[in-house]
Amino acid sequence: MAANRLVRAWGPMTKSELIEAISARQSQLSTKDVELAVKTILEHMSESLACGGRIEIRGFGSFSLHYREPRRGRNPKTGDTVQLAGKHVPHFKPGKELRERVNLGLQGGL
Amino acid sequence: MTALTKSEMAERLFEELGLNKREAKEIVELFFEEIRACLENNEQVKLSGFGNFDLRDKSQRPGRNPKTGEEIPISARRVVTFRPGQKLKARVEAYAGTEPQ
């Protein structure tokens, strides 16, 4: 991990950097194949949530939908009251390993 | 509906992209491990179209043992939050079901 992380610029990791990082850690697939794989994984996850499903990744976390009740909102421009329909929003709950590792990062002074 | 897990993700990589099963399993594993490693290093992860994994540092705050009522401080900690992207929010919003997840 350290090797490919060192060449990466400081700052948020983007999808293309994630693809590069995964490529650097395996030898069988081309970067192009890894890119397709990452996009397929993200599409699979989005599709599953869009159909009301859950995602459970041990040691990483789970994704599910939370329901937001219908409510009265306001158009910030005109001040008019508008009725907003109920809707679902994606929710992520970090798993134990992720929680612990991120917190160790803090204890380690990063 | 059963939950989506790593094995179904690997299965799809095998079916759709023709990766062999071992490669597919490894890529799925690396995908989540690289995100974890990044967050562990206090770096945000931004996956356009899906969402961002952000980090928040929380300072110590007073807490209580819910069983005994005893006051105990909740230590300072770093937590991961997920902010879904516009595209994912729009897709999920359209889901009309109301049954509990």
Image (spheres, helix red, strand yellow):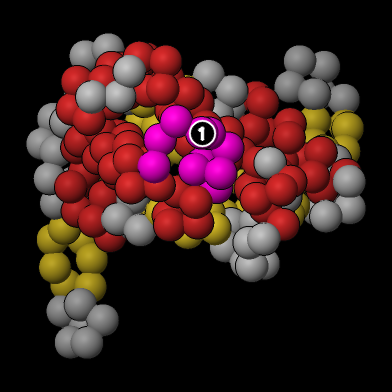
Q: Which residue is mark 1?
A: A27
Q: Nearer the viewer, residue B66 or B48?
A: B48
Q: Main secondary structure of the magenta part?
A: loop
**Crowd rating for badge 1 (residues with CA inside 10 Å; few <14, some 14–19, many 20+):** few
- Residue B16 screen position, x and y as percent: 18, 27
- Residue B80 screen position, x and y as percent: 60, 45
Q: Residue at x 81, y 38 (%)?
A: A104
- Viewer can see residue A33: yes
Q: Nearer the viewer, residue A99 or B94?
A: A99
Q: Quadrant of residue B36?
A: top right
Q: Residue at x 33, y 47 (%)?
A: A32
- Residue A2 screen position, x and y as percent: 74, 46
| Left or right relative to B14: residue B60 | right
Q: Quadrant of residue B35?
A: top right
- Viewer can see residue A69: no
Q: Nearer the viewer, residue A42 or B15?
A: B15
Q: Is residue A25 above or below residue B56?
A: above
Residue found farthest to the bottom: A77
| Left or right relative to A75: residue A41 | right
Q: Is residue B95 magenta?
A: no
Q: Amino acid at mark 1?
A: Ser
- Circle 1: element type: loop
Please state, as top left, top right, bottom left or bottom right, where the N terminus of chain B lies in the image: top left
| Left or right relative to B89: residue A19 | right
Q: Residue at x 53, y 19 (%)?
A: A58
Q: What chain letter is assigned to the residue under label 1? A: A
What range is drawn magenta here?
A21-30
